[in-house]
Image (tube, rainbow, N blue to C red):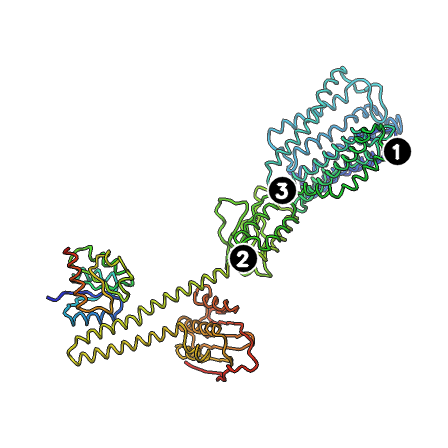
Amino acid sequence: MALTALVVDDHRLFRATARMLLESEGFDVVGEAEDGASALSEVARLRPDVVLLDVQLPDATGFDVAKQVTSKRDGSRVVLVSSRSASEYGELVAECGAVGFIAKDELSGQSLGAALREGRADEDR
Amino acid sequence: MRIADRALRAWAWAGFVVFFGTMIGSTVVDVVDRRNYSDWGSNDTLSGIVFALMVSLFPVVGMLVVHRQPRNRIGWLLLAIGLAWAVSGMLDVYARVALSLAPGSLPAGEAVEVVGGGSWVPPFLLMGVFLVLLFPDGRLPGPRWRVLAWIAVVDAVLILAAITFTPGRVDEVPVPLSANPLAVGPHALWQGVAVIALPVFPACILAAAVAAVLRFRRATGTRRLQLKWLMTAVSLVAALYALAMVVSLSNLSRNPDGSDGAFMLVLQNVAVLAFGSIPVVIGVAITRHGLYGINRLISRALLVALLGVFVTAVYVGVVVGVGTAIGQRQPSVWLSVLATALVAVAFQPARDRLRRLVNRLVYGERATPYEVLSDFAAQMTGRYTTGELLPRIARTVSECLGGARVAVWLRTGDELVPEAAWPLSAAEPPPGVTVTGEELPVLPADHVCPVRHGSELLGALAVDVTGREPLAPGELGLLDHVASQAGLVLRNVRLVEELHSSRQRLVNTADDQRRRLERNLHDGAQQSLVSVALMLRMAANQHDPEVLSATLHEAADQLQRAIAELRELARGIHPAVLTDRGLAPALTSLAERCPVPVELRDELRRRLPAPVEGTLYFVVAEALTNVAKYSGARLVQVRLADLGTAVLLEVADDGVGGADRSRGSGLVGLADRVAVHDGELTVSSPAGQGTRITCRLPVPAPAPDDPTTPARQPEAVAG
């Protein structure tokens, strides 16, 4: 069964493109959210397997949202995305409970799958 | 029942006339009847007149005071002193007429003579005890002092009784009597009373002086100042009397026959006259204490007194000291000449030294106003940094004003803020006060002196004299002088502050611009490019040619949008057209992109230095952005004029107006930018009448045949 995904980003263009890309690679994009508050309510409502979460949101940082999502331990895993590079955020990515980080321009079903696999391997260890 | 002021004045005048009538009568009789002697140390007519003059000063001042303030108790006391002297004079006149001028013409001459012998007691009681005890408000310093008042009164009565009733010989003016006609009781009784009562009298006077000193120490404000006046006069009189006593005891100024020499006579008369200074200063203290600088008077009086002591000391030292050493009994003419020469030579340096000493005593550490001003001038030569300067001004002024609290207020924008104060205090400084125009607002202080440069209000010096004496006219004058000099200082301080904050704003503006740029790149071009990347990745996996084509078209469109956004951003950073083709095409391009129609009138026929062109461009760009965002205007006129050594730029719209330079950071940033080139930016934006931004920038005068001057179309209209 295809993994369900929620795309959270304040740029409509990115949400649309990411949805098309992920769906073309076998993900089931079940919803979109444009800020932190609606992201949390959509996660609670849709219980997606993966939350593709932008770091810079209008009302909160992606790190704060990721912490709240992962603390509930209801199965949703978070992969952070940003048009900046991971090195700009350093430890913050690992500390917020997200399983991985993908630069926006490197996003694909493949890279997302790889991030999830790597995250699961970490959890198993 | 309350007596009307008019009635009080009438009574005062009546008493005053009685006093003068008696005084004149007494003086006439005194001159006619030469067989008298005076208790005042000499028996010449001059001394009699001097004494009469001195005594007259009491009721004269009393009359002046009562005339202005009919309920002033001290005024009435001064009048009473005059009347007491008048009674004394009347008794004297009566006795002289009855016993000397026309013997037998009046009854009871001898009895009057005896009573007159004690007539000095009441005026001395009033002058020596009550005047000092009741000054300045006519009330005792405290309920306990009532005891002193009673002791003094009882003592005076006892002295009078002893003088009046003691049996035996009476040694009085004008005729000594062999037996007292009023004698009552045994001689020993009255003598005992006199022995006890007489020394108590000066003790009461001394106690009254102590009361005045105590009153002075706890007095504040006007009361303190009034007491200071009195104490100054009393000290002067005491010093002169002490001097007279020293001269008298030293046998210095004595004629060979044992009578007083000329110097002694002058000194005695001066001392008697100086006594008259007491009522005079009382009058000044009551009615005019705010008009004269007491400190100045004190320092002068002290200087004169010390110089007197100096001259006397030299004289005594040389004439008596040297005279004794070389075995001369009589004062030598040569030694007198030597002493005079010494005094003449040493007088100037001694006066300078004494003046410094006196100034230090009266004005404190910082000494005279002159020193303060010269010190102040030295401070402005740049020995101190701005941060040190304002506290230093406060301190200098405070020390000069005898430690009053002085605050230096500085204007920042439309607010006066207390920037420095002396003496330092842990209390919270008062809040800032809003300034309207160039008017000095009300500040929480007793004396406030505005500090201006030209008409521009830069700050203020505020002096608080709570618990101290009010400032004397001289001190107020000094404050004015310091304030006028401080104008330059505060202007410098303000320029430095303005430079500092404008520099800060420039840095902040640059930071803001960078942040905005990053945000714009991130939200605009970067997002578009990210999408293009994702679309191309999607296209790579696409096998359906139709979907592939659509995806690639979408990616190309997105890429074009990104390019457009980047172009716009680049123009915002610095428009290439400005660098390449100059101001006119750059402004035309701005005008074309403005949503409000722009009428551009460019009268500039030459290229300007790049920074100037950049500044003018950004002023127009910011102005047009504001017009589009806020003004609701239908037309904007942009005019650029070449004034030779300056360029004038005007951007005027017909919108709603009401733009506030202090609120919009954009306008402030522009003003800073213009200020960097020594230019001026003014914004006039009355509500409902549109906004006019005028910018004047100095530029190098054009060269006579400037090859870079391109021919341009004078006018371009775009919309």
**Pointer 1: residues within 10 angstroms few (<14), some, or many (20+)?**
few
**In the structure shown, which secondary structural element does the residue marked by tag 3 occupy?**
loop
Which callout, 2 or 3, points at the residue further toward the start of the chain?
3
Report whether mark 3 lies on the same chain as mark 1.
Answer: yes
Q: Position of residue B221 (x, y in %)?
A: 60, 42
Q: Which mark is residue B32?
A: 1
Name the residue that disc number 2 marks: B493
Q: Chain of mark 2?
A: B
Observer-nearest of B584 and B483: B584
Observer-nearest of A74 and B375: B375
Q: Position of residue B283 (x, y in %)?
A: 70, 41
In this view, the mark in front (2 or 1): 2
Name the residue that disc number 3 marks: B364
**Pointer 3: residues within 10 angstroms few (<14), some, or many (20+)?**
some
Q: Chain of mark 1?
A: B
Q: CA–CA distance between discs 2 and 3?
A: 29 Å
Q: Amino acid at mark 1?
A: Val
**In the structure shown, which secondary structural element does the residue marked by tag 2 occupy?**
helix
Q: CA–CA distance between discs 2 and 1?
A: 77 Å
From the viewer's perspective, tell me whether residue A74 is left or right of residue B154. left
Q: Which mark is residue B14?
A: none
The residue positioned farthest toward the front in the image shown: B326
The residue under the point 24% across, 56% down is A95
Quadrant location of residue B173? top right
Q: Position of residue B530 (x, y in %)?
A: 26, 71
The answer to whether any part of residue B15 appears in the image is no
The residue under the point 34% across, 67% down is B518
As displayed, is residue B607 above or below residue B103? below
As displayed, is residue B673 above or below residue B191? below
Which callout, 3 or 1, points at the residue further toward the start of the chain?
1
**Pointer 2: residues within 10 angstroms few (<14), some, or many (20+)?**
some
Check whether the beta carbons of the residues at disc 3 and disc 1 lie within 8 A of each other. no
